[in-house]
Image: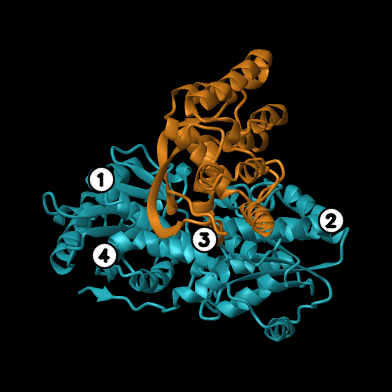
Amino acid sequence: MTATATSVRIPLSEYARILGQGEIEELRALARPLEGRSIEMINSTSVGGGVAEILIRLLPLAEELGLKMQWDVMSGGEEFFEVTKAFHNALHGAPYHATPRDFEIYTAFSELNRKQLPLDAEFVVIHDPQPAAMIEARRRNGNHWVWRCHIDLSHPNQTVWDFLESYVAQYDGSIFSSPAFARRLPIPQYLFYPAIDPLSEKNCELEPRFIAGVLERYKIDPNRCILTQISRFDRLKDPVGVIKAYRIVKRYFDCQLVLAGGSASDDPEGAVVLKEVLREADNDPDIKVLELPAWAPLEGNALQRASTIVIQKSLREGFGLTVSEALWKKKPVVASAVGGIPTQVIHKQTGLLAHSVEGTAYQIRFLLSHPEIAAKLGESGHLHVKENFLISQKLKRYLTLFLKLSNRH
Amino acid sequence: LTTFAETPFQFCAVSQLTRIGNQSASTIEELGKALSECSDASIFHHTFQTLSAHHFLTENFSNDFAQWAMADANRNDLGELLASLDVRDYVSIPVLRSDLCRIVNEYCGAFPEFAKQAALERFYFCEGVEVTIPLGLQAWTLEEFRQGIEKLSHDGFYFHFISSRLRLQLLTNDFSQWLANGLGLKTLADTINKIDIYTNTLDSTRAKILRLIDRERRKT
């Protein structure tokens, strides 16, 4: 069974307030030749994850521009999602021995979905590896198909990639989040950055009273420096490294550290990492380890807005959109030079990059010593996000791609 | 008395798509080789197009090659040389490519020990794909022209003011061209053409142009 997901409706006029009327008029002009034409977006989940989060918001904007955009979610049983999760990790480079049975399960569920999903829109956009085999339903000389890959394919498991590539090569084009994540393919590859929605609860403006309330609830002193990393409790986000960097900074500056992430209660690995973090924190009253519920984005927003510096000390990263969230709030950011982070943090222009615990501590100390430079980086970071990583830009890129594919411009 | 141009100025909506290329470089020497082989669209993307995407950086940002030389290859001296190229001096991509290659190759010749040193991150060559559509907005008079400039998006403004040089094959821009030829305002056209885009953001450049137009309107 397929499910059609529901979307969040914010009119374009609200975005004009932030982006300027010129940007909205441009979107309208680009959309005009595409008016009434159909687009089908397909992914594998209607809730949770960055893809669903962005599609929920993209759909109503596209509709307001006159496009007939539809979002369908493919269906799959437990065994299908077990296989695709293993594929996902393997494509990220994790060790994995694929069996013929794995490929049979993938193929069988793909066949089932090809019968259930419409797949007849003029432009079909398939998100990630799970529904990649939908391309086999393409009619000859029919519609335009694009594969949107949200994951890093730079070091994939070769067996899984070879299997997937046989489908991907049939598309009209592919989209990656970074040139470093792409593969050599016989089809055009386009660069679309992931995006944040400036009007979502994660990023919208907040009343100072609300922010003060959140700080009070978590016993964070608003009158002292606040260093924050907002990330799930995952070793690849290096929360223990963040505490070590904080301890170095603490020798020179009176500061507090906030480590806030999603609840670890339903994530066995997260619970282990959380324990490691608490052990490293060693009951330091200035280290606040917070488990934020996923349904409380306003709290994360408030914590970022209250921060003096936002840290993202990942050891490995996809694109790392929490960086853009902090930059949008004009916060100075100190982050690791991994994954998509250097695209967002242009060193010494929109933030500072580091490669170690000591380097992270040094950059934080530098910014605390030079608040005027910190403020300037925050301002430039905000403009960088406005220009490159907002949902409006993403919509514009899709419009441009559809125009290019249909050659009607 | 309002002056009308014989042909109106047509404002455009513009969007850039980035296509990921198959070339990359991990050393300065490899960068030099790839620079000589990559497409014109790639040179355009990493010089003209990137300036539009990073227009708000008014210090030490000029083009992607210079940024990579400084931040990833850790060669500030090469970065400075590459950053000193002003895209507005170029009306043809082959000439710009030739200057980029010359700088990188001369550097490799002078500092062979640095030419083969691995950079922190690879440089990935991409290409710009531009789509333009009439915005449905045109100007016959200076007043209408001012209103149009005010309504343009960043990309539209950049298209008319900066990348138009490549289209026109002249050291001028769409705005100045129309002001001089359409309305006979050569002095205003020249003054606008001299605005330094490297030390101004697109917003501050636009504000300067609007101020200059206002001054001209007061004169008449």
The answer to whether residue A196 of the structure is visible from this angle is no
Type of the residue with mark 3: Glu
Residue named by callout 1: A163
Q: Which of the numbered marks, if any, corresponds to residue A181?
A: none
Q: Distance between the Cα atoms at labels 4 and 1?
A: 24 Å
Q: Position of residue A373 (x, y in %)?
A: 79, 55
Q: Could you confirm whether marks 1 and 2 are on the same chain?
A: yes
Q: What residue sits 72% from the left and 51% below the top?
A: A357
User: What is the crowding at mark 1: few (fewer than 14 residues within 10 Å), some, or many (at least 20)?
Assistant: few
User: What is the crowding at mark 4: few (fewer than 14 residues within 10 Å), some, or many (at least 20)?
Assistant: many
- Chain letter behind tag 2: A
**N-terminal-most mark, 4 or 2:** 4
- Chain letter behind tag 3: B
Residue named by callout 3: B144
**N-terminal-most mark, 4 or 1:** 4
Which residue is situated farthest in the front direction here?
B1
Residue A37 drawn above or below residue B184: below
Q: Who's cyan, chain-wise?
A: A
Chain B, chosen colour in render: orange
| Front of the two marks 4 and 1 | 4
| Front of the two marks 1 and 2 | 2
Residue named by callout 4: A40
A409 relative to B99 in the view: left or right: left
